[in-house]
Amino acid sequence: NAGVTQTPKFRILKIGQSMTLQCTQDMNHNYMYWYRQDPGMGLKLIYYSVGAGITDKGEVPNGYNVSRSTTEDFPLRLELAAPSQTSVYFCASRETGTPNTGELFFGEGSRLTVL
Amino acid sequence: QQQVKQSPQSLIVQKGGISIINCAYENTAFDYFPWYQQFPGKGPALLIAIRPDVSEKKEGRFTISFNKSAKQFSLHIMDSQPGDSATYFCAARVRTSYGKLTFGQGTILTVHP
């Protein structure tokens, strides 16, 4: 029962490098989300997707890009990493249609440090 | 703009005591108010949720109290246990927003044995 799987769990980047955080879910959920978590700030929405080929910006999208070529996968791309992107990143998914509880299912997170 | 404000930032409670975490919101279009629990190294997981047509929801030792007129809601943990030590997030959602949640800042709860 995998649920939402994120890789890598930990990564250290140098300023200016790029990388992709991977997220895959096996629950056939149409809605997927990327959040970042910073101490004392809660979780902030970066990007979200309502289905394959459809993505949109959240509250803090600058410096990130996403794609959604399949229902299962929703990778987050960091271009030109900056220290301000040091954070813990969470991918989540949600079922659609009725009935549904509205519950978001989260992965275990990817901790990124930019030095 | 912080649309959901959560307090306190941290809370220490003795085993068997009551833990209370408060949240206030501004957007009257919010129609769903969940609480998420997060253990160290894990992702948040849904604990309990309420819709604004009821004033209280109870699941075991966990209760949400909701005050629509004051735009406030709170989580009460009765008979708090060391295993309840975690970070708690309140959240809110606008019905037409594709399930996007706006989270509070989080409360780190420590329950001493």
Image (tube, helix red, strand yellow):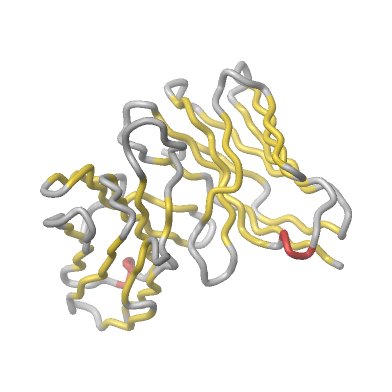
The x and y percentages for residue A2 are: 39, 66
Front residue of B20/B96: it is B96
Front residue of B18/A24: it is A24
The x and y percentages for residue A26 are: 31, 60
**Residue A88 appears in the rendering:** no
Answer left or right for B23 relative to B58.
left
Q: In this view, does B80 lie above or below B22?
A: below
Location of the N terminus of chain A (image quadrant): bottom left
Front residue of B1/B64: it is B64
Location of the C terminus of chain A (image quadrant): bottom left
Identity of the residue drawn at 67% across and 35% down: B64
The x and y percentages for residue B96 are: 32, 27
Q: In this view, does B55 lie above or below A95?
A: above
Q: Is residue B52 above or below residue B13?
A: above
When asked about the image quadrant of residue B13, the answer is bottom right
Identity of the residue drawn at 59% across and 65% down: B39
What is the tally of numbered marks visible in this picture? Answer: 0
Identity of the residue drawn at 35% across and 75% down: A112
Identity of the residue drawn at 70% across and 58% down: B109
The x and y percentages for residue A58 are: 28, 45
**Residue A65 appears in the rendering:** yes
Q: Is residue A13 above or below residue B75?
A: below
Q: Residue furthest front?
A: A1
Answer left or right for B102 relative to A64.
right
Answer left or right for B67 relative to A33.
right
